[in-house]
Image (cartoon, helix red, strand yellow):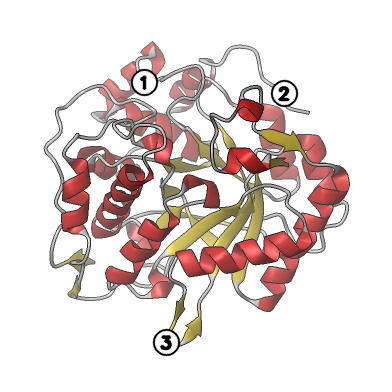
Amino acid sequence: KKLKTRPQRPSTPSAARRPRRQASATMAPLARAAAPLLLLAGGALGRVCDEVSEKKVACFDLKSGSRIPQVAMGTWSGSYSDCRSGDYTCAEQHARFAVDNWLHIGGTHIDGANDYRTQVAVGEALRTSGIPREEVFITTKCPGAIGYEATIECADDNLQMLRQFGSKGVQYIDLLLVHFPSTIKPACRFNREAPECKDTPILPAGKQALQDTWRAMEELKTIGVVKAIGLSDYNITNLQDTLEVATQPIDLHQVAWNPSVHDEAMLDFCKKNGIQLQAWSPLGGSKGSVLREPAIAKAAKAHGVSAAQVTLRWSLQRGVAVVVGTANGDHTKGDIELFGFELSDDEMKEISAIQGPTVVHI
């Protein structure tokens, strides 16, 4: 599918890519300029994960029967390093540009969350894109194990922010996740610099809260405003507590996953229980970027691709979906071009060995 007008973007130098992608300081006004102009031209791309759309981005099957594009464009404000902490306007502008550009080049999966503070911009990008609803896969998240009623309200809020109420009534969320197995302290929702947030802004949720929240997720799916449901950043015990009461599949679990941090026990548990694993920070997390690792550089040279493409491809070949995050148009293009090469078994083993001893989260 082609769009009549390409979103404007700044020119960016070719530099080593980082997990937290850099965007030009001129991004904000350009994001505004890109806003209202995406109109379709030519034939339709087709529904998400149909034969036509999979020629661009392959999909994984979810246990409930849904299918999910293997690569998503994330909209976390922390992906935009030229936005200072607390500058939500800057983050919204960058997220708007990132979504515009992703849709323009044929991306179909958008990943968001309440806590990203970018949902309104994402919703506006979706509304003005001219792309039919069935041709986009929307993931969003509720802020923790907040209980039954609050989770129902969270879905309502997300549907409104994402512009899913319209002339034909309410649309739907393709995938709704519980963002973390905890709750945020009240003051920390609005100011992470508050004194009570210094040590930790969150409070662990008990087993009952985890289970009540999951019951609400299943209810939302039964109602039909959510198509698939899952979790994020749970440990294996949290997953087991949820599975105790689950009457519908946990379709997906989103966790930190990259060559330097990959919990093999978690991957095995998810495979055993039919849960699709998905990576956030797929290029490197708290340990820093993996893009200069020799094993990755060697594979990139062998295949004539970037280090970032090798790193993302490693996750996909492990059966793990990825969420990327950037407002850099050149990086965006590379993030979608992951299906024209395949890493060898030896390359996969060498990249997996970057982590060292296995990390287990129980």
Real-space CA distance between mark 1 and mark 2, rounded to the nearest whole angstrom: 23 Å
Q: Earlier in the sequence, mark 1 or mark 3?
A: 3
Residue 167 - label: 3
* Residue underneath mark 1: 291
Q: Which of the 4 quarters of the picture holds residue 257?
A: top right
Q: Residue 10: image x %, image y %?
A: 14, 41
Q: Amino acid at mark 1?
A: Leu
Q: Amino acid at mark 2?
A: Val
Q: Earlier in the sequence, mark 1 or mark 2?
A: 1
Question: Disc 3 or disc 2, which is closer to the eye?
Answer: 3
201 versus 166 height, above or below: above
The answer to whether 31 appears left or right of 251 in the picture is left
Q: Amino acid at mark 3?
A: Ser
Residue 88 - label: none
* Residue underneath mark 2: 360
User: Secondary structure under badge 2?
Assistant: loop
216 versus 250 height, above or below: below
